[in-house]
Every structure is written in structure tokens, then in C-alpha cells.
Amino acid sequence: MRAMSKGNKKSAPRRSRRGWLLFTLFPLIALSFFWGWIAWLGRESGPPSRCYGGVVGGRLEGGRRLPLWGENFSSYSVLGYLFGRTFMHRTVRDAILAAYADLSETHPGLRFVYAESGWPWGGPFAPHRSHMNGTSVDFHVPVRTRDGAVAVLPTSIFNKFGYSIDFDRSGQWNGYQIDFEAMALHLLALERAARANGISIRRVIFDVELQPKLFATEAGAQLPKLVSFNRRQSWVRHDEHYHVDFDVPCRGEKPPRSVSR
Ligand SMILES: [Zn+2]
């Protein structure tokens, strides 16, 4: 009896250590496999991108994603990227990359952040109401600090990766000022790059109260002639990000509905 209880005393901590190790390692291994699978889905050698239906109710095949970061841009969240929330139609991805490349030459000091776009397979993408066929992409507004230095919005799980930030009517929040000129330059570059890639911008959703400030900039003055903007406020205020719907021919597409985020 004594010998048995001695053995139990020795093996119990070992077993619990092994159990703890499995408890912590299993989720990490499962996550690594999931992230690897997501990366595999977006591989360049994968099937061509095909979109079906509209931004609401549609789906996507062969989605691609932007790199996590580049010379003048980055993703809104490493987690969002790893979990596959930044997939889009390949042509849209190529146009966005071309626009960033263009801006890195013409305005190398500016920094841009792209946000959510969709799942690799498209379809419902909560909490967004659209973003279902790989042709919708959100971008964080470019910002500067009070002293005019180029900055990016701080994002974390606590501010819903930037989506819960609220700018005031003058475009300021917590020491950050929306760089309307940089935003206009980005939209102009996107418009040019979309056309160069055989697509176009269908519409841009941005807070209607902040739009006049965008159009008042030197670059922004050209925007209303080139790009269609929402005239009415969307179901959520688009002040910390702007939503861009690209016009890509999709199979079985119905006319777009007015919901967007
Ligand atoms: Zn959106």
C-alpha cells in the first residue's frame, strides 16, 4: 500500500503537467493548422478568382488577400489577417496593390491601412451586411497627429480593431486628425488602378458630414466627377473607415442594394 501511494504521488504531477501541456498546446496546434489552411486558400497558384451574385447574398471562389504589410501600407489587424477576414477577388487585390505602389512613388511619406474585406469563400460576413462576393473592401482613414506627423489609427480588440472609433464632425479623434488629402489621393489612385486592371469603382461609402471636407482638398476636388459616393448616411457611420465597392463582373449578379458596411 505504501509503495503504491508513493508511486501515485510521483505520477500525479507528471500526468497533470502532461494534461496542462496538451490543454495549452492543442489550441495552438489547431490554430496553426487553421491559419495554414487559410494561407493555402489564398495561395497565388490557386484557382482563378470568381465572384457570384452581389455584395449582399453573393459568394467568392479563389479569393486572394493583400500582404500583411508593404512599403506604405499594412493590415488593420494581424488576427483579422490570420483568421481570413481580408480576402477579396484577385483583380480587386491587384488594383489595390497597384494603387499603393503608385502612391509609394508619388507620395512616399504617406501610410495607409486596409481593413476587412471578406472570407476566402465569400458569403455572410458579420457584422458587415455586404462584403459577400469579394468586391467590397474597407480602408481605415489615413490620419495625422496634432503636430502633423503621418500616423495610423491605433487598433486593438478593445476598439473593435478600429471600427468603434468615432471621429467628430471636424474629423478629429483623440489627438488624431483625418488626413483628407491623403484619403483623396488614395481614392484617385484606386480609381486609376481599377481602370488599369479592367474594373472600376462602383461606389464609395463615407460619412456624409465628412464628405465636404474630403472634396474640399486639392486632390478631393476631382473625386465627385470620377467616383460615386453615398448621398445618405449608411446604416453605420463610416467615419473611421471608408467602404469601396469595386465593379467586377460577377456571375448571376443582381443590382446592388443600398446596405453597405
Ligand atoms: Zn465595408
Image (spheres, helix red, strand yellow):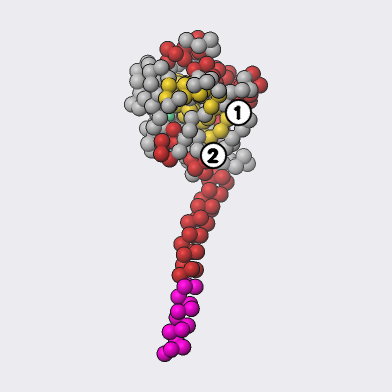
Where's residue 254, x and y in %?
40, 27
Tell me which amino acid carries mark 2: Gly
* Mark number, residue 62: 2
Q: Residue at x 38, y 18 (%)?
A: 169
Classify mark 1: helix, strand or loop.
Answer: loop
Tell me which amino acid carries mark 1: Asn
Where does the N terminus fall, quadrant-wise?
Answer: bottom left
Query: Marks 2 and 1: in contact by CB < 8 Å?
Result: no
In the rendered view, would you say 52 is above or below 217? below
Residue 217 shows in the view: yes
* Mark number, residue 117: none
Label 2 packing within 10 angstroms: few (<14), some (14-19), many (20+): many
Residue 117 shows in the view: no
Ligand 1 found in image quarter: top left
> Which secondary structure dominates the residues rendered in magenta?
helix
Q: Nearer the viewer, residue 163 or 197?
A: 163
Circle 1 residue: 72
Q: Residue at x 43, y 89 (%)?
A: 2
Q: Nearer the viewer, residue 26 or 253?
A: 26
Magenta stretch?
A: 1-15
In the rendered view, would you say 250 is above or below 126? above
Picture quadrant of residue 96? top right
Where's residue 261, x and y in %?
40, 29
In the rendered view, would you say 212 is above or below 238? above
Classify mark 2: helix, strand or loop.
Answer: loop
Q: Nearer the viewer, residue 145 or 214?
A: 145
